[in-house]
Amino acid sequence: MSEKGEKWTFLHVNDSHMGTPRSFRFRPAVNRRWAAIKQQMADTEAELLIHGGDLTRDGDIHEFEYQQAQQDLETLPFPSFVIPGNMDVGNKHTLVNGVKRKWEQRGLGWNDPDLNMTSERLDLFASWFGPIHWTFQHRDVRFTGFYAAVAGTGLPQEERLWQMLERLPQLPKTQHHVAMMHYWPFMEQPNDPAWDLTDPDQYDNWYFSIDPPHRQRLWDLLQKAGVDILFCGHVHTGRSVQDVDGIRIYRTPAAGNTSQLAERWTDADTRFGFQRCEVTPSEIDVAFVPGNDQCDEFDSYGPMGHPSAEKRDYSIAREQPAIQ
Ligand SMILES: [Fe+2]
Ligand SMILES: [Fe+2]
C-alpha cells in the first residue's frame, strides 16, 4: 500500500445485467457493452470496485447467473464488493393482495407481487457474494453498501439493515464516507410523496424509489453517519450530481442495460459506463467513464419485463443445455 496522502482510485459500477443464451431470454448487446466496460475497468489502476446491484439478467430465478457473475468479477485485478439489485434477488414488496387485483383490473400486465424478494433468495445471493449489507474501511474511506429495498418487508434482512445503519456513527471516523444502494432513495427530494403503485402515472416513481417512512429514516441515518457520497442505480439513467443535506447523490447510468425514464430530464445520460473515483485527503473526484462499446441491440430473444413462470419458454434458449 502506498503512503498516506497520495492519490488513489476506486471504481463504482451498477446494472451490468449479464445474461446467458441458456435462458428463456437473452440480449447479447448487454453482455457486450459490459464486457467492454469490464476491460476498461481492469485497465485502470484501481484498488477496488463497488458494484451497486443488478449483476444478472434473471438471477432472482437462476442461481447459475450468480456463478457466472461471480466468476466474471473474479477476472478483475482488484477485489469487488457487491450488493444485490432487484433482478438478482426479487423486487420491492407490494403490500396487499388487493393491489395485485387492482393492477390486473387496470390491465397493466405486471405481476410484480409474485416476484417479491424472499429471505431465502437474499440468503442464497449472500452465499455467493457475501452479506447484502456491509461496511468496511479502506485507507481513509468508509464504504457502506446495502439493499435498501428490504425496508418495509419485515424480513430478517430488514432488521440487519437498520442495525448496521444505526451503528455507523460509532465506527472509527474516516475522512470520507461513500455509501451505495441499488434503488434511488427518492425521485427528486427526500420529502417526495408516498407514490401510489396502483396509479399508472405514479407506478414508475414507486418502482424506482424507497417508500416513506423508510426513506426518511434511511436519509436521517446516512446524514448521521457522515456520508459524503451516495451512489444509486436501478433506473439505468444518469443525472447530474445532486447535493442534498451535504450528501452528493450520484444517480448513475447502467453498465449494460437500457436507460429508463430518460425523457423526464434534460440532463439525462443514457450512455453505458462506470465511475472512476480519485481520492485525495481533501476530496473524492468522481468522473463518469463511458464504455468503449455503446452497441445497439442485436439478436435479442424472449420477453421483456417481469414475465411470470408460465411465460418463460426455455425451449427457445440459443445454447444448450438450457437452464433448468
Ligand atoms: Fe437494473
Ligand atoms: Fe434494478
Image: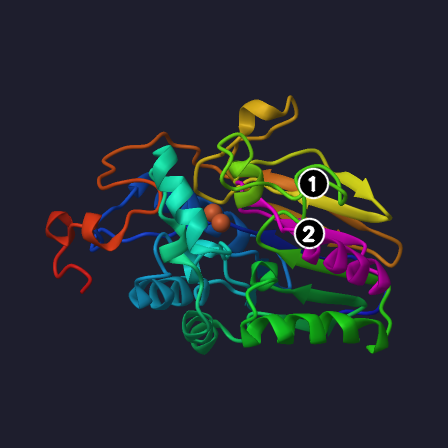
First reached walking from the N terminus: tag 2 or tag 1: 1
- Residue 227 in magenta? yes
Residue 146 seen in this snapshot: yes
Label 1 SS? loop
Residue 54 seen in this snapshot: no
**Mark 2 near mark 1, Cβ–Cβ under 8 Å?**
yes
Image quadrant containing the N terminus: bottom right
* Colouring scheme, one of rainbow, by chain, secondary structure, one colour: rainbow
Q: How many marks on residues? A: 2
Give the residue displayed 74% in from the left and 73% down from the top.
137
Question: Which mark identifies residue 12?
Answer: none
- Within 10 Å of the Cα at label 1, are there few (<14), some (14-19), or many (20+) other Cα atoms? few
Q: Start and end of the magenta stretch?
A: 208-235
- Residue 158 in magenta? no
Q: Tell me which corner region of the image, top left, top right, bottom left or bottom right, holds residue 142.
A: bottom right
Q: Is mark 2 within 8 Å of ligand 2?
A: no
Label 2 SS? loop
Image quadrant containing the C terminus: bottom left
Q: Whole-percent x and y of residue 198?
A: 49, 39
Question: As displayed, is residue 7 above or below residue 241?
Answer: below
Question: As displayed, is residue 151 above or below residue 156?
Answer: above
Q: With 302 as the anchor, is 306 left or right in this view?
A: right
Q: Whole-percent x and y of residue 202?
A: 56, 34
Q: Which residue is mark 1?
A: 193
Give the residue displayed 79% in from the left and 63% down from the top.
221
- Within 10 Å of the Cα at label 2, are there few (<14), some (14-19), or many (20+) other Cα atoms? some
Question: Which mark identifies residue 212?
Answer: 2
Tell me the CA gap for discs 2 and 1. Answer: 8 Å
Q: With 102 as the anchor, is 300 left or right in this view?
A: left
Q: With 64 as the anchor, is 112 left or right in this view?
A: right
